[in-house]
Amino acid sequence: MQTKNFIRTLWAGGGGVLVAGLLAVSGPGFATEQAQERREGRDVKQDSKQAARQNKVDCKQESNKSNAECRQDKRDTKQEGREQKRDIKH
């Protein structure tokens, strides 16, 4: 009950304008930062997918590994990209 009265007092005394102003200022900055993190994560993921494809092609051409072994190398490369993406986002 005291919390509601405190909030009403702040709102009536102009504190609501202050709170609303702070939210308006911090909102766009946070959204931009989040968008940048998503973009970086996407770029890392796409780069790792391309590297994985190239690794598989190279593996098949240069080594005596089976297709299954080359496929596992590709999966490992993609997993590393996912981990890098998680590191960027968190």
Image (cartoon, grey):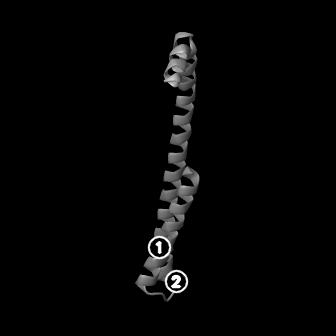
- Residue 25 or residue 62, whichever sits in front: 25
Task: Give coordinates of residue 50: x percent, y percent.
Answer: 48, 63
Per the image, the residue denoted by label 1 is 74
Q: Is residue 63 above or below residue 22?
A: below
Task: Give coordinates of residue 88: x percent, y percent.
Answer: 57, 52
Q: Residue at x 54, y 66 (%)?
A: 80
Q: Residue at x 56, y 16 (%)?
A: 10
Q: Report how far apart the C-alphas of labels 1 and 2 lie in the structure.
A: 15 Å
Task: Give coordinates of residue 37: x percent, y percent.
Answer: 54, 46
Q: Residue at x 52, y 10 (%)?
A: 12
- Residue 71 or residue 59, whichever sits in front: 71
Q: Is residue 16 above or below residue 62?
A: above
> Can residue 17 be seen in this snapshot?
no
Outermost residue, bottom direction? 64
Q: Is residue 31 above or below residue 5?
A: below
Q: Secondary structure at mark 1?
A: helix
- Residue 6 or residue 82, whichever sits in front: 6
Q: Is residue 71 left or right of residue 86?
A: left
Q: Residue at x 56, y 11 (%)?
A: 14
Task: Give coordinates of residue 46: x percent, y percent.
Answer: 48, 57
Per the image, the residue denoted by label 2 is 62
- Mark 2 residue type: Glu
Q: Is residue 89 above or below residue 36?
A: below
Count all numbered tags in the image, as a single digit: 2
Crowd rating for badge 1 (residues with CA inside 10 Å; few <14, some 14–19, many 20+): many
Crowd rating for badge 2 (residues with CA inside 10 Å; few <14, some 14–19, many 20+): few
- Mark 1 residue type: Lys
